[in-house]
Image: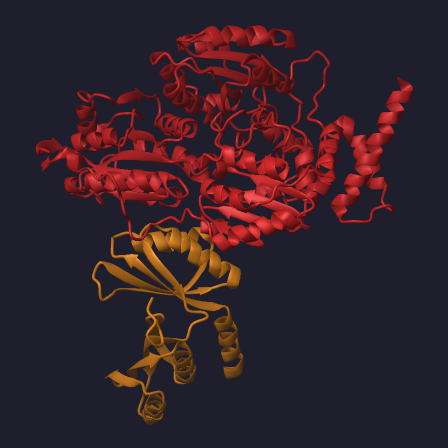
Amino acid sequence: MSTKKMSGAQIMLECLRQQGVKHIFGYPGGAVLPIYDALYDVEGLEHILVRHEQGASHMADGYARATGGVGVCLATSGPGATNLVTGIATAYMDSIPMVAITGQVRTTSIGKDAFQEADITGITMPITKHNFLVKHTEDLPKVLAEAFYIARSGRPGPVLVDIPLDVGKNIIDWDPSTYPKKVDIPSYRPNTRGHEMQIRKAAALIAEAKRPVLYVGGGAIAADAQAEVTELAERTNTLVTTTLLGKGAINEWHKLSMGMLGMHGTAYANHAVNNCDLLIAVGARFDDRVTGKVEKFAVGAKVIHIDIDPAEIGKVRVPDVPIVGDVKVVLTELLKVIEDRPWSEWNDQILEWKELFPLAYPQDGQLYAEYIIDMINEVTNGEAIMTTDVGQHQMWAAQHFKCKRPRQWVTSGGLGTMGFGLPAAVGVQAAFPDKTVINLSGDGSFQMCVQELMTATVYELPVINVIINNRSLGMVRQWQELFYKERYSHVDLQASPDFVKLVEAYGGVGMRITKPEEVRDALEAAIKIRNRPVVIDCTVPTSENVYPMIPSGESVGEMRVREDLEELKASVHADAEVWSYSDEDRVLASYARATEASRSTEKSNG
Amino acid sequence: MANALSNTIVQQMQDHHVITALVENHAGVLARVTGLFARRGYNIESLTVSVTDDSDISRMTIVVGGDHTVLEQITKQLQKLIEVLRVVDYTETAAVERELALIKVTADANNRSEIMQVVEIFRARIIDMSDKTFVVEVTGSPDKIDKIHLLLQGYGIKEMTRTGVIAMARGSRTA
């Protein structure tokens, strides 16, 4: 209990320390000189010097996703701050808790177009949960306490704190023991407890349902609710599909897990959702990549929607039973009132679809991304933490990488940020130096933040980058093939650097593989390297597409499958007269018949 | 002409909702609110802001267009802003709504007395006068302002400004 003379910068770092912050990802500059000066002496805070501020924001994001804590990044005013924008927007779209601290020009220069001035609170208003411009050094402790509280509570999200040079420089009397331990903001009190009556209604719907499905999103990860989701699934014998961000909300090796749904989701998860009579949405927001055409999404289903953000309720789909609250708290209450359900024929039906429409890829001796990901599961015993970039490789990873736990899967979902994977992996590895962290990337995405290989080398972070190299911007190429008459406009990446030499130039280890039989050795060798980054450049075919695929804005009926299954689909559509239920039911019934037919042909041929 | 115009107004009014938001009286709150409306594509018909009895709190009265679903999203999204304390939708509530308008109307020796009669019927006031114009001040419901606007158009309106609606629930209920 003693008052000290401290600069704003010192106060800020003391506040971060008291918040439990261990790592800051940042890059210095004029307006943050007082902060960097104070960092020179500080103990208990590791600053990781990045090579580009965008990298700092993704690192803080990856760190937050893997640990569940708040990620912190730091940049100077003007261009430093604007370089954080992509990372802040990425975190905002995926509801990731982050505090971004930016320098600002002196309070007396604000609004005068001073050197390196940018209105970063104005710029980030639509992509932060909240932001602050601190005008007085005395306000710093309260603002920082509120920033961390807002970032991690309710529906989490990024918060930006803009600190002018003089606010960081001023010296005031401050007693560090007065840093607020608890924060109360009268205008911000998120509701975590679900309404008791609504929970009872939900239990009643679950008891009545004949064909229930659990649809679980990132909210379940944010709420740390894997145990509750799994218990609900097991006790009611309900199969679970997760969104891209919900991966890990149930162990994906569990027999009740159907993997991901949506545009590139498994066919069986999509068929299940489309034919269910009760959709239990848990911390998910009915994103367009999940629903496709909303009017045709799960048309016959009643909906229970559990979400901490009231604005998500009814935004896309009006639920029959809305429950606003923290997913973990609500599920805990729900588990007290539900009745257990036996295994059902409906479940058998879904498992049958799972057998009929597996995630298959050719076994023709060529190297495929899916095989590499399957091998990652095997070689790491399912224990790796995977980050990804954005594109085909990301969707293959979403389909094939199997999470045992939450926070094993770090990917940019809502914003779809190419260049996210490597810096995110650096952030994850900084939090967990002893774990195997694999960034699954593409030859396009990898080049967007490739400079952070240097950060990994300097801090001895053994991030493994597996580049699915198809010498093409594969996902765009796929859309051009399917929807733009094969007019391959500007997707050719034949001209790329030699990634092996590139990583070596950054001080890491490079390998190149071209055949399936090389995958295991390469992965095993990479995992043993513990002090620098690794790149495994994997040459895969250019023309591979991600299937299944429901084209944008369409529904399950329009699902496209691998070419070898296309014939099957054609026969399904020809089989019109026996259709009797909803469109989707018909499709499924005939799918099943057609598959049965082709199987018996195979058998008789064999 | 007059009928067609008033029909349009009536139609518009059916999709109009008055909401008030109590917000913290900080710099930048207005930008957050208007930014939210702009980026989510909500249509603001009018917006007024003023400080309340408590100088730390401002009251925004916003007239928005859109159906019930849109209105629900607007109120929920507004409520999510950290500096917004409370949002009240007056659609289902008995409320008084008032607006003030200043209308500069062409008034020469030939029609002055006619205009003065209109002003009197609407309980409006003439607060400025020149050899060619009157400035008319009128207070009332938006509907009443629309009507006097329509009537004065016949004489030639040189300019007009409206404050936008402010609203308050009837009886003892408060926002």
Identify which residue, A569 or B151, lies in the foreground: A569
- Tell me the residue at 79%/35% (across/down): A569
Where in the figure is residue A361, as x and y percent of width and height?
70, 21
Residue at point 25%, 43% (across, down): A133
- The colour chain A appears in is red
Looking at the image, residue A217 sits to the left or right of residue A28; the answer is: right
Whether residue A414 is visible, yes or no, is no
Specify the quadrant of the image occupied by residue A19.
top left
Is the residue B48 above or below the residue A495 in the image?
below
Q: Quadrant of residue A280?
A: top right
Image coords of residue A8 (percent x, y): 16, 34
Q: Which chain identifier belongs to the orange chain?
A: B
- Give the quadrant of the N terminus of chain A: top left
Could you tell whether A165 is left or right of A325 in the image?
A: left
Classify the position of the C terminus of chain A by image quarter: top right
In the rendering, at what x and y percent does residue B96 appear? 37, 76
